[in-house]
Every structure is written in structure tokens, then in C-alpha cells.
Amino acid sequence: MSNAPTPSVPTMRDVAAAAGVSKALVSIVFRGAPGASDETRARVFAAAEQIGYRTNRTASLLALRRNKHIGLTMRVRNAFHAELVEGLQAAADEVDYRLVLGTVTANHDERHAVETLLEFRCEALILLGSTLTRAGLQELAATRPVVLVGRRVSLDNLDIVRSADDRGMEAVVDHLVSLGHRRIVHIAGGPGAIAADRRRGYIRAMRRHGLTEHTRILTGGASEADGWRAAEELERGEQPTAITAFNDHCALGAVDRLTRSGTSVPEAVSVTGYDNSFVAQLAAVDLTSVSQEPAVQAQWAIQAAVDRLEGRRTQPAQVVLEPRLVVRGSTAPPLGT
Amino acid sequence: MSNAPTPSVPTMRDVAAAAGVSKALVSIVFRGAPGASDETRARVFAAAEQIGYRTNRTASLLALRRNKHIGLTMRVRNAFHAELVEGLQAAADEVDYRLVLGTVTANHDERHAVETLLEFRCEALILLGSTLTRAGLQELAATRPVVLVGRRVSLDNLDIVRSADDRGMEAVVDHLVSLGHRRIVHIAGGPGAIAADRRRGYIRAMRRHGLTEHTRILTGGASEADGWRAAEELERGEQPTAITAFNDHCALGAVDRLTRSGTSVPEAVSVTGYDNSFVAQLAAVDLTSVSQEPAVQAQWAIQAAVDRLEGRRTQPAQVVLEPRLVVRGSTAPPLGT
DNA sequence: CGAGGTGACTAGACCGGTCTAGTAGACCGG
DNA sequence: CCGGTCTACTAGACCGGTCTAGTCACCTCG
């Protein structure tokens, strides 16, 4: 069986010899290309199995003149991005692509990260929550497939995957109203299309429920500190019975402030977040939130990039997912019901 | 200048032609290998610059019979791991290696993740907070370089990078004592070498300060829920003036519980975490903690793996870093001082 | 002056796949 | 019976680097 001194890993040549066919045929079989009989395929696979052959990706990529690298920019500190990456990684593995991470940090901005990814000759780019300018994106997308995750922008040469933020926030308001709330305020996320969408969803839902007069929007942001400040501001003026925050972090800051100043959640006031991040799920936090279905978004993003790369599509694609409300302990009926 | 219809990316052959030398010489120059005069090197680089040449990594790796992949297992939900990954990524780029991520999740355990990385033919493995058995590690390390980050284990065929957890916890106690605290309790992290080290550091420091009689250790864990439970237990019996928790998450859970039951931090009780994670740094949290210097650990881990791969070392290496205390607002002098 | 050494450089095999151009044989219709 | 088509298969060039085994000019020294 092993009379050859073969110390290294087996190659196609070895499989060919073992199966009594040519190297080219083994290649055909392993690529699933047409041009081999079923009988032969089985024999080749058996021989490969026998000697423990696995195709050498490097050699394959060289011959194909490709590298199957997908560049990915993300913020490490962003728990939602971390969750997306998990899904992206799995989806990329599935279709035999490699992810090259480009992390955006304080001293390494998005432009720089993208630059690095291009140095690596990434064939496509997936940008999580990009803040690049329209012009910058346009230019990038002219070179290679670009998929934007979680950002809305009207450009016709790139693909977009996001979830319907307006409808997500509407679902939150619907939930609160169904619990009996009427004085519901919104802590907004600042400028940016996503924050605008969530704000709009809030306004629309309030109107739909005939609560326009109770509509109240506070300046907030994406961080705990922003939520904290907004909650502080809330202490002046009429108290709401429920607060919808731009995201989980913001909600957490608000909860923190409220709790410390003696307002209990959810007894005195209900609070909701957005993103359904890890932190919202923690027992000690238990925050009602909205899931953006990161795994599904990841799946779509990879799909979009690969479809472009393999020429299965040339038209821009835009996928808008339906967000999912996740009810937890931070929301309850208002006092006196 | 461009009379050739060259539509594709330039190769070594093109550079060779442009510089009037052989392909082999260009290779020598780009690898920084000996065998070319300074004058020629300059000419080759100039020619390459001129035509925009970049070496094709795939071809290079094929010829070298390598892939320069380093496999990495991590927990996505772990903020400290996220921070480590950032550093690892940067360090790997620096030495021209690629990181292949294997995420450990609920339905994809560490064994499985490692399996996947091996499928990818990773040349070395870096395991963050591995929970594999000694036997499992031993077996893995017999095949290829393995670097353990943040786990202590006595095996002589792998490299270890960690920080001195005992001394980190000692620094915490020293800090609290210097503020005037004497009744200092510790919420432990459960079994495992790291938790044991931190516990030991606490005990040792307490003894050193002559506070052995105040030594008190509560059962805790690594999560918010664990900290919450421990704080709850604390409400029975004598109240301490300071609490040292196993890590930031655990500390957070404790703070949450304390605050909700009317005990203010840091006025009534000081609380410390460990890891100096993102969450500890948040304005709304502002937790005194201990940094494990993730960037430095990352640097060492990559170094260790690459040194092994490039044959610069065959003996096992163990790096123990000095942790760094980060004082924030969750610690203050005890009441009545 | 010739043997031997050294530094600069080159031709061409090689890494392990993919793929084009081609062969051999089976089948088929006229 | 013969040209044409189809299927199964193969030889060998090729991808873009690395590297071995050279060649050649020049220097050194007995």
C-alpha cells in the first residue's frame, strides 16, 4: 500500500495515478465539471478518499487567476458588527471565499482600512455601517463589487443589505401602545439615514395611533453617554411612561440614569432599545429590543458579493429585511392599568 | 510608453523586461534576498513602481508550498477577544500572514472550530481562552505550532501568552487599601486557572496588608448574572466597603444589583472589574479595572507563531505580561474618611 | 600566470492546479 | 460504408512566482 516514500501531502497527480486516469480528469471530477462518466467520478473520489487527497486551494486560485478574498470593514467595538461578522464568516466559508478583516479604529479610519483591503487585492468589499462619502463609494464600486450593510444610499452601482428601520420602530411603538402607553418619547440617533428612518417610524406610528400630540423627540446618539444625557433632560418637564431609544447602547445609558435617580424600569417607565445586541440579552439588562437578523443580513451580503463576482448578476440589488421585535422585561404596562 | 495591449496586472516578467534584467533577479530583489547590487535593486524597484507592479501572493505561496494562514479561535460575544483580534489582525498583516477566523458559538464548539481551521490547512493555531483538554492540546501541538492566549497550562510543546492575573488582582487590592478600604470582598470566577490566579492574588494582597481576617470570597462567575447573584448574597451579612470582581461583566452585574437595591457606587461601596473592556470604559459605567494589554498580547502571540513557523525557535515560549491598573470612578475612599 | 574564489546575474525546472486542443471510440442517418 | 456528432478522456501549456544550477567577469594569491 505505501511502498512509495511519499512524505508530503498527496496531489492530483497521485490521485490520477491511483485511479488510473489523467490529472486533467481528476480536476474535472473535483470541480464537478462536465466530461466524466458517473462511474469514473466514483472511482476518482474513492481513490482520493483512499490516499487522503484534498485540493490545494493556492494552486487552484493561481490557475484561476483569482484569490477569492472578500474584504470586510467593521468596527471592533460594535457588538452588532461582531455578530454580523460571525454570520459573514460562516456564509463565506460555505461558498469557499475568505474574509479579510479591515478594522476601523480611532487611529485607522475607514478610508485607511479600505486601502489596506485593496492592497490585499480583495475581489469584493463588504462595508458594515460605512461612513464613506457618496463620491468615495461610487468610485470604489466602479472598480469592484461593493456591498453596503446597514446604510441607505442611492447609488446605482452597488448592492445594499439593510433592514426596514422605520417598520422596526413602528413595531416598538405598536407594542408599547398595546400595553397601554400613550406618553411615549423617542431618543433619536442623530443625523444619518438610519436614525432618520427610526425617527420617522416612531412619528408615523404615533400618528397612526392618534398620539400625535404626545410625539416628543429628544436629541440622543448611539452611545450610552447619549442615552444618559437624554434621560437627564427628560427629568425636566412632563414624564413619559415609555421611552424608545435609537439603539441598545443608548437605551442602556438611559436606563442607568433613570435607575440611579430613583425611577424604576419597567415599573415607572418602560424602555426599549434596538439591535437586540448581546448586551440587551443579558439577564441583568433584559431589554426589549428589535432584531435586525444579523445572520440573515450576513447571508445576503455574501450572496450579493459572490453573485457579482461570478457574473450571475450585474444589476444593483437592494435587500430590505423585516426587523423582528423581541419583547423582554424592560417593557410593561404603565402604572395605573 | 504603453504600446503593448497589456490589459491585465503586470507580472514579474514585465518588471524584468522594463528593468532589463531577468525574472529571477526581480524575484531576488523583491524578496530582499542576497545576490543583487544596490544599483540594480534601485533600478528594479523603479521599474516596478513605474508599471505599478505588486507581487502576486498566490503564486508566491504556491512556489513556497505554504499558505501563511494562521487559524484563530475566539468567542464573538467576548469583548476582550474582539479587542485581541484587532491587535492580532494588525500584527499578522505586519508580518504578511493571514488570519483565518474560527468563531466559537453555542452550536459550534471549540473542537469544531479547530477542525474547520485545520480543513483550511492553517499552518499555526492561536487559541483565545481555549477550553480544550490537555490531551487535546497536546495532540494539536504535535501537528503544528499552537499558541495559547490567556490560559495557563503546563505543556511543553506549545507557546503561551498571558498576563500575570495574580499580580493584577494584587494591584487592585493595593489600590483599594490605599484609598482606606479594609473590608474588601472578592467575587471569584469559578474553576479554571485564571480565576484561581486572581483569587490567589486577592488572598495574597489581603494577607500582605494584614487584612487576612477580612478575606471573604463569594462564588461568582464570568457573566453579569453571576455578579448579580453574588451581590444579592452580599446583602445578607456584614457589608463590605469594596468589592473586587473576577471581570468587568461580573462587576457590572454586581453594580446593577447594588444600585437597584439602593446601595450607591462608589459612595457606599467601591467596585472593580478586570479586563478593562469597552464596557468598563463607557461613561455611564466608568469602572476601575485592570488592562491585560490586549495589543501587546496580540503582538506576542503572532510573534510566537511566526517564529515557530519560520524555524527561528523550537523551544516552547511562555510570555507573562504585567497587567496595568486603570483607575476610574467606581472606586473611592470608604464612607467616613 | 593559472587555480580558485566571489559577487552579479540568468535559464529553466518546478509548485499543483486549470483549461485548451485534440484523440479514440460509439452511435447515427443516409 | 462514410462523414458527422457526441461522450469520455488525455497531453501539455499555462498561471506567476521561487529556486537550483549554472555562466561570466573580476579579484587574489602562490
Image: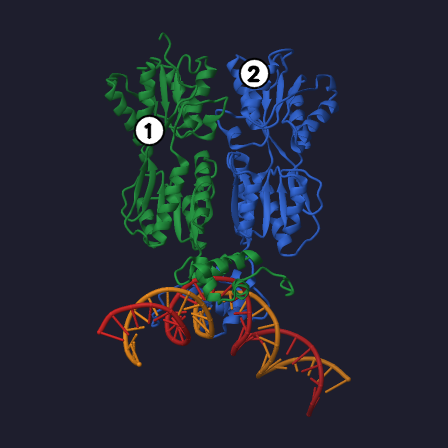
Chain colours: A green, B blue, C red, D orange
* Point 37% across, 43% down: residue: A301
Q: Nearer the viewer, residue A336 or B1?
A: A336
Q: Position of residue D17 (x, y in %)?
A: 51, 65
Q: Secondary structure at mark 2?
A: loop
Q: Secondary structure at mark 1?
A: helix
Q: Nearer the viewer, residue A36 or B138?
A: A36
Q: Is residue A77 above or below residue A173?
A: below
Tell me the kind of residue under disc 2.
Answer: Glu
Q: Residues within 10 Å of mark 1 (few under 14, many from 20)?
A: many
Q: Residues within 10 Å of mark 2 (few under 14, many from 20)?
A: some
Q: Quadrant of residue A88?
A: top left
* Point 52% across, 16% down: residue: B259
Mark carried by residue B267: 2
* Point 66% across, 50% down: residue: B142
From where the camera sits, is residue A21 visible?
yes
Asked if residue B203 lies left or right of residue A219, the reply is: right
Residue position marked by numbered label 1 in the rendering: A168
Asked if residue D30 lies left or right of residue B196, the reply is: right
Distance from the alpha carbon under mark 2 to that under mark 1: 40 Å
Dot in front, 2 or 1: 1
Whether residues under marks 2 and 1 lie with C-beta atoms below 8 angstroms apart, the answer is: no
Q: Which image quarter is the N terminus of chain A in?
A: bottom right
Q: Position of residue A58 (x, y in %)?
A: 50, 58
Q: Position of residue A74 (x, y in %)?
A: 44, 41
Q: Is residue B224 above or below residue B296?
A: above
Q: Which residue, as the protein is rendered here, is positioned at the far top? A: A336
Q: Quadrant of residue B132?
A: top right
